[in-house]
Every structure is written in structure tokens, then in C-alpha cells.
Image: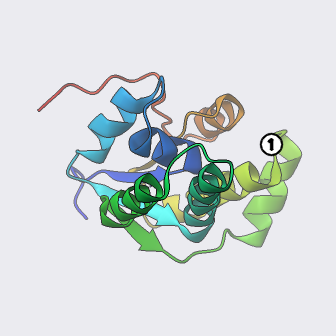
Amino acid sequence: MDNNDQVIYWDASAILSALFKDSHSHIATKWAEKDAAHFLSTLAYSEVCAVISRMRKENILSDILIKSSFEVFDQGPWRRITISPEWEITRDLSQKWSLRGADLWHLATSKSLQKDFPELFMLTFDSRLETAAKGEGLISLTGFRPSPE
């Protein structure tokens, strides 16, 4: 990748905002439309699948809307990656930031990927994860409003 390429690591909160209308959907949709490498980890995939399935079980969405949600998710811009964060990075970040386990995993995975993709940034709408991502030099763009192209 050259210096002009963007690499975006999406956590589950950002993906869900791209799939379902909420207060962050406009931002998530703009980023999903960007010509970039959109990374989707196995953990984020699992988290999103769990939320969609829970919406079905709790009768929040009909079966047809659940099926449609999975189709949009599977056809979205995300590049599925299978990666685990580096052990030492995970341990070090756990001592520095007060995060839930899954959020620590996303942060450590992003930091691990950043070694190979220095242009990588994390897109998240979780306030604690955003604070940690900013503190670690990952450019978390929760408040950034991309200009339409």
C-alpha cells in the first residue's frame, strides 16, 4: 500500500452503526463508502452476528429483516482478516487502559496491525475504546465528519 491508502480497523460499534440507523450512522456510512482497506476481525464479526441474532430472538426485527441484515453485512466493504493481537502488546495495554476484554482485544489487534500498516486507524463509537485508541496513536475518528466525495 502506498502512503495515500487508508486502512480502517472497524470495531463492532462502528459496523453496527453502518448496518442500523443510530446517532453515528451518518459517519459510519461515509467511512464505509471510502475507497480504503476496511478490516473486519473475527471478533468483530462474532460480536455483530451475536447482536443481529439477539435482535431476532428478542423480536426486535422480523426474520426477513434479519436475513437482509446478514446479507448487507456479508456484502459490505469489510475485508475479513484472521489475526490475533500480540501477547506482549495485549499485556502492556491492559496495564495502561481500563477496557473490557473485547475492547482490549480490538485495541491490541489494531496496535499489532499498525506495525505492518502504519496508516491504520480505528473506527469506533465506544468512548472508552476511542480514548485508548487516541492515546495509542491510532487515529480514532468518532467525531470526524468526512467530506462527501
Could you tell me residue 96's position as x and y percent? 83, 42
Query: Quick check: 66 above or below 139?
Result: below
- Identify which residue, 43 or 99, lies in the foreground: 43
The secondary structure type at the circle numbered 1 is loop
Residue at the image position 33 percent from the left and 22 percent from the top: 145
Residue at the image position 43 percent from the left and 32 percent from the top: 21
Q: Is residue 49 left or right of residue 99?
A: left
Query: Quick check: 25 above or below 19?
Result: above
Query: Quick check: 30 above or below 77?
Result: above
Q: Is residue 15 left or right of residue 5?
A: right
Which kind of residue does numbered mark 1 sit on? Leu
Viewport quadrant of the N terminus: bottom left
Query: Quick check: 70 above or below 5?
Result: below
Could you tell me residue 88's position as x and y percent? 78, 66
Task: Tell me which colouring the rendered structure shows.
Answer: rainbow
Which residue sits furthest bottom? 82
Say whether residue 122 is visible.
no
Could you tell me residue 15's position as x and y percent? 47, 48
Viewport quadrant of the C terminus: top left
The mark tally for this picture is 1
Report crowding for label 1: few under 14, some 14 to 19, many 20 or more residues within 10 A (C-alpha).
some
Residue at the image position 40 percent from the left and 59 percent from the top: 73
Say whether residue 38 is visible.
yes
- Identify which residue, 84 or 60, lies in the foreground: 60
Residue occupied by mark 1: 99
Which residue sits furthest right? 95
Residue at the image position 71 percent from the left and 49 percent from the top: 103
Could you tell me residue 18's position as x and y percent? 40, 42
- Identify which residue, 142 or 71, lies in the foreground: 71
